Amino acid sequence: DAYLAAIDAANPQLNAYVAVTPEKARGMAKASDQRLGKGEGGALEGIPLGIKDLFGTEGVHTQACSHVLDGFQPRYESTVTSNLWADGAVMLGKLNMDEFAMGSSNETSYYGPVKNPWRAQGSNLDLVPGGSSGGSAASVSAWLCAGATATDTGGSIRQPAALTGTVGIKPTYGRCSRWGIVAFASSLDQAGPIARDVRDAAILLKSMASVDPKDTTSVDRPVPDYEAALGQSIKGMRIGIPREYRVDGMPEEIETLWQKGIAWMRDAGAEIVDISLPHTKYALPAYYIVAPAEASSNLARYDGVRYGLRVPGKDISDMYEKTRAEGFGREVKRRIMIGTYVLSAGYYDAYYLKAQKVRTLIKRDFEEVFAAGVDAILTPATPSAAFGIADQDMAADPVKMYLNDIFTVTVNMAGLPGIAVPAGLDAKGLPLGLQLIGKPFDEETLFRTAHVIE
Ligand code: GLN
């Protein structure tokens, strides 16, 4: 009830939820009470969560915040949310996001932008919460849920977590099942939690992760007790600092934050090592070929026949055309056009195949560093603090918006786990985050190390 009241009070301002499910929440909470009364209950009994609108939730609004999915309520539940409910968690509702998870500011949502609960000191300017999981990050930051699900294809868990002072982890590709989550770029998409602290993120990920016969890319490995990793010393751990992440035009405050993080690691007994990830500079352009290519294919199914919106036309082609023209927003159309172009005969080798090769090189860079004894890599999470809604520069030039993902996309390209952890405030009082990147399936080291920073 307290969370539902908080949503009622703050959501008209923040726009973090696109659907609130009070009846469901109260019913689930009651069932939790009964289980607890009988001395039963799972790890998340009674914990109220917000769910990103990308997760299929049975009989509940699931529209990836797109007009093209108007009215869609699936008859299935995603594996990740099923796992959470099986552990006793309670659903408060569905959270706003960039349309089909394409964006870094939550401004591409059909339901309008989410406002960051944080503002710069002495300013009335509304800031973005980051994207695409902007609703997840804002709702956790403003206490409109105890934790939230999110997804990360190129930074969409970590970047909004960093811009709202919350913790977000993208686990290793394959750690969580993608089944029942609306697909954006299937070889990059991963689910993970956004939470108020590292401990909450550890508890949530433990529940979300599982192998799943319905997703053949999910991996059959035991899910460790991530919480047990917290509080363990990082003495003797080798933390890599990649020199290629010192990008041109990086603001002073980000460099300062990074240096602070390095000092904290050193004080905790870790050994700091300079490392090189030489193909870093190609990650962003390669990502913005691979992700749209996969998206253009995944989004072909929204044709007015099977889901959501249908705009009538004089024949079936006309109906497809009108539905897609009206149903998709500008950014989604841009991605479909880029994706279709780079996959088309004559351009496939020059763009898509080249980007896949670059992806392999990026992955190898990381493998070499880890093989040389590095345990985790420390970088800033974002190249700046939260920026203003309707930022003129970014509106005029989508590539400027894409630059927000510069520190996060490499991790998706390599399939590695990455965590964003709050690391202090900038001069204007806005949160900044650091990122830790780990070896495949070594989320424990990330939790352990992030706990030292928070
Ligand atoms: N900002 C990136 C994009 O727009 C990442 C999105 C994501 O991780 N879902 O593609």
Image: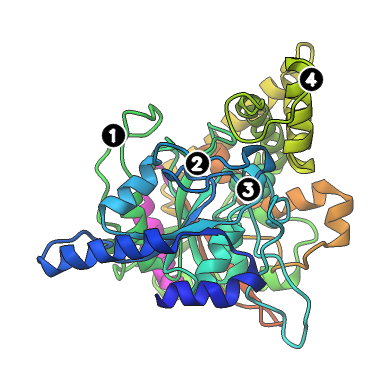
- Which residue is under mark 1? 220
Q: Relative to 51, does residue 10 appear above or below in the rendering?
A: below
Q: Quadrant of residue 123?
A: bottom right
The amino acid at mark 4 is Asp
The residue closer to the viewer here, 333 or 319, is 319
Residue 416 inside the magenta-drawn segment: no
The amino acid at mark 3 is Cys
Magenta-highlighted residues: 438-454
Chain-order first, disc 1 or disc 3: 3
Tell me how far mark 3 sits from mark 2, CA to CA.
13 Å
Tell me how far mark 2 sits from mark 1, CA to CA.
30 Å
70 vs 420, left or right, is right
On residue 111, the disc is none
The amino acid at mark 2 is Gln
Chain-order first, disc 3 or disc 4: 3
Front: mark 1 or 3: 3
Front: mark 4 or 1: 4
- In the rendering, at what x and y percent does residue 193 appear? 44, 56
On residue 73, the disc is 2
Tell me how far mark 4 sits from mark 2, CA to CA.
25 Å
The amino acid at mark 1 is Asp
What is the quadrant of the N terminus in the image? bottom left
